[in-house]
Image (cartoon, rainbow, N blue to C red):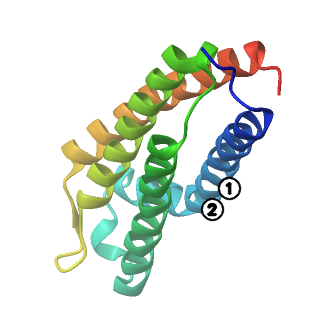
């Protein structure tokens, strides 16, 4: 069996780093909007939130979700070094589940009625946390075995 070229391994490492970086940056960008919405829900003040503010939150959630969905696609399109195929398979599965949970959270917001399906919102938040923990653990494991 032929060894993977150094160029393909470098492409994989670059692709993985791009996913990590954009995920972190996107999470940091959307966090204040999440906090604002979570605070309003907790205080039962969603109806008092200006419509434009709720629309902005929903738009930010959607933009973030689109980044995560694109990253899931990027991961699916990459070819991992042979020694990382098992871990990479897990990474793709957990990242895709994370992106799906983000979509579920975004979909729990009803912009037209300025409402949130709180049960779906909370379930999506729990799923995001669980899947991101798995994504992070898998990436750490991969980096520990990497010889990039």
Q: Are marks 1 and 2 in contact (CB under 8 Å)?
A: yes
Indicate the quadrant where residue 58 lies: bottom left
- Local packing at callout 1 (Cα closer than 10 Å; few below 14, some 14-19, many 20+) is few
Residue tagged 2? 29
The dot on residue 80 is none
x and y percentages locating residue 135 in the rendered image? 53, 28
Residue under the image location 26 percent in, 50 percent down: 104
Please provide percent x and percent y for residue 117: 19, 54
Question: In x, y percent, where is residue 109?
Answer: 26, 63
Where is 114 relative to 25, above or below? below
- Residue beneath the point at 57% across and 55% down: 31
Question: Pointer 1: what residue?
Answer: 25
User: Can you name the residue that lies furthest to the front here?
Assistant: 1
Q: Closer to the camera, 120 or 91?
A: 91
Q: Quadrant of the N terminus?
A: top right
Q: Is label 1 or label 2 in front?
A: 1
Lateral position of residue 131 relative to residue 85, left or right: left
Who's the residue at 62% across and 13% down the image?
Answer: 83
- The secondary structure type at the circle numbered 2 is helix
Classify mark 2: residues with Cα within 10 Å, few (<14), some (14-19) or many (20+). Answer: some
Q: Residue furthest bottom?
A: 52
Q: Is residue 1 above or below residue 109?
A: above
Quadrant of the frame with the C terminus: top right
């Amino acid at each position: 069996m032929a060894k993977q070229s150094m160029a393909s391994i470098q492409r994989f490492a670059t692709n993985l780093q791009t996913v990590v970086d954009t995920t972190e940056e996107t999470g940091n960008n959307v966090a204040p909007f999440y906090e604002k919405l979570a605070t309003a829900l907790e205080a039962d003040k969603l109806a008092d939130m200006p419509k434009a503010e709720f629309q902005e939150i929903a738009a930010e959630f959607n933009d973030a979700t689109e980044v995560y969905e694109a990253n899931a696609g990027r991961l699916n399109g990459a070819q991992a070094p042979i020694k990382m195929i098992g871990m990479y398979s897990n990474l793709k599965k957990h990242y895709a589940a994370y992106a799906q949970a983000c979509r579920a959270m975004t979909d729990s917001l009803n912009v037209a009625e300025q409402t949130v399906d709180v049960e779906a919102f909370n379930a999506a938040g729990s799923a995001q946390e669980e899947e991101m923990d798995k994504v992070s653990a898998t990436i750490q494991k991969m980096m520990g075995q990497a010889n990039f």
